[in-house]
Structures are given as C-alpha cells and as structure tokens.
Image (cartoon, helix red, strand yellow):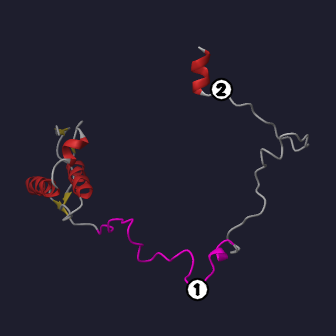
C-alpha cells in the first residue's frame, strides 16, 4: 500500500475494532486512514487479504497509536453487530408461523395478486385498443450489431 498525505492530517481517529474477521479488520484499517486524511492510493487487495487477521489488527493499532497524539481520539460510536447469514437476526420473525399452513402467507391481504396498473405485453400484442399505448421496437443487441459489421 502506498500511503499519501494530501494536505495535512484531519479529524480525530476512532480506536480500532477488536475483530477476528479479516474483512472487518481490513475495513477498519482503511477507515482509520480515511479519518486521518491519508489516502491509501492504488493497491492490490490480494496483498492486504493475504495477511493474517492479527497482522492487520497489529498494523491498525500501531497506526492508531501514532495518529492519536497528532489528531486526537474520537469516542467509539456504537457499531452494529456483524451480519451473519447463518443465524437469523434477533428481531427477525419467521415468514410463516410454525402452526400455520405454508400457503397462509399468500392468502394475506397485504399480498395483492390482482391485476396490475401495467398492461401485459402479451395481451396487447394484437389488440387495437383505444388506450393510446404504443409499442416500441427493440434495438438489435450488441452481438447482432457486431455480426452485422
């Protein structure tokens, strides 16, 4: 990573996270750089993600300890818990209750299955309705244009 300081250091920095997730640790490092006004420049993400999570955390903590006396520390904001696909959220309710039949959700009045405000393309194909709707011809696809050249 080629760090660049454009102008002078800015803003207060927030203490780094204590995480075991590599993505969160990398994002925390980049957040710390951004808060201080340091530009990361162009870098290969693989170079960052080939590091162990502890190496990223140590580098972030070292950078924080260097920046803190220069720009000050910002109090830690309440951070949301990391999202997990493996477990439902605490306030999330199941879509269908255990004692309810599976099609009960489709019968709910909040799910409207009636006609739409949009006309169907198949129903208008041969009709001469006076609604004033016109059909637009589609342009040829990119592949068709290239083949025509």
Q: Is residue 143 above or below residue 81?
A: above
- In the rendering, at what x and y percent does residue 62 appear? 9, 55
Residue 91 falls within the magenta-colored stretch: yes
Q: Is residue 39 visible?
A: no
- In the rendering, at what x and y percent does residue 75 appear? 21, 66
Q: Is residue 56 above or below residue 18?
A: above
Dot label at residue 140 = 2
- Along the polypeptide, which appears first: circle 2 or circle 1? 1
Q: Which corner quadrant holds the C terminus?
A: top right
Q: Residue at x 21, y 48 (%)?
A: 49
State the CA–CA distance, disc 2 to disc 1.
52 Å
- In the rendering, at what x and y percent does residue 13 appear? 19, 57
Q: In the rendered view, does 118 fall on the left or right side of 59?
A: right
Residue denoted by label 1: 99
Q: In the rendered view, does 63 fall on the left or right side of 14?
A: left
In the image, 76 versus 47, the foreground residue is: 47
Q: Residue at x 41, y 77 (%)?
A: 90
- In the rendering, at what x and y percent does residue 52 appear? 15, 54
Q: Is residue 102 above or below residue 53?
A: below
Residue 102 falls within the magenta-colored stretch: yes
The nearer-to-camera label among 2 and 1 is 1
Start and end of the magenta stretch? 78-106
In the image, 20 versus 30, the foreground residue is: 20
Dot label at residue 70 = none
Mark 1 crowdedness (10 Å alpha carbons): few <14, some 14-19, many ≥20: few
Q: In the rendered view, does 143 fall on the left or right side of 79?
A: right
In the image, 80 versus 149, the foreground residue is: 149
Q: Which corner quadrant holds the N terminus?
A: top left
Q: Secondary structure at mark 1?
A: loop
């Amino acid at each position: 990573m080629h760090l660049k300081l454009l102008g002078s250091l800015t803003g207060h920095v927030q203490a780094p996270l204590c995480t075991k997730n590599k993505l969160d640790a990398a994002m925390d490092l980049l957040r710390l750089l951004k808060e201080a006004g340091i530009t990361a420049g162009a870098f290969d993400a693989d170079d960052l993600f080939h590091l162990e999570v502890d190496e990223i955390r140590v580098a972030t903590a070292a950078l924080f300890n260097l920046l803190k006396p220069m720009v000050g520390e910002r109090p830690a904001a309440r951070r949301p818990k990391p999202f997990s696909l493996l477990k439902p959220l605490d306030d999330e309710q199941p879509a269908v209750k255990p004692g309810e039949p599976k099609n009960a959700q489709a019968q709910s009045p909040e799910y409207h299955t009636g006609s739409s405000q949009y006309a169907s393309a198949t129903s208008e194909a041969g009709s001469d309705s006076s609604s004033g709707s016109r059909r637009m011809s589609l342009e040829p696809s990119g592949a068709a244009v290239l083949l025509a050249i």
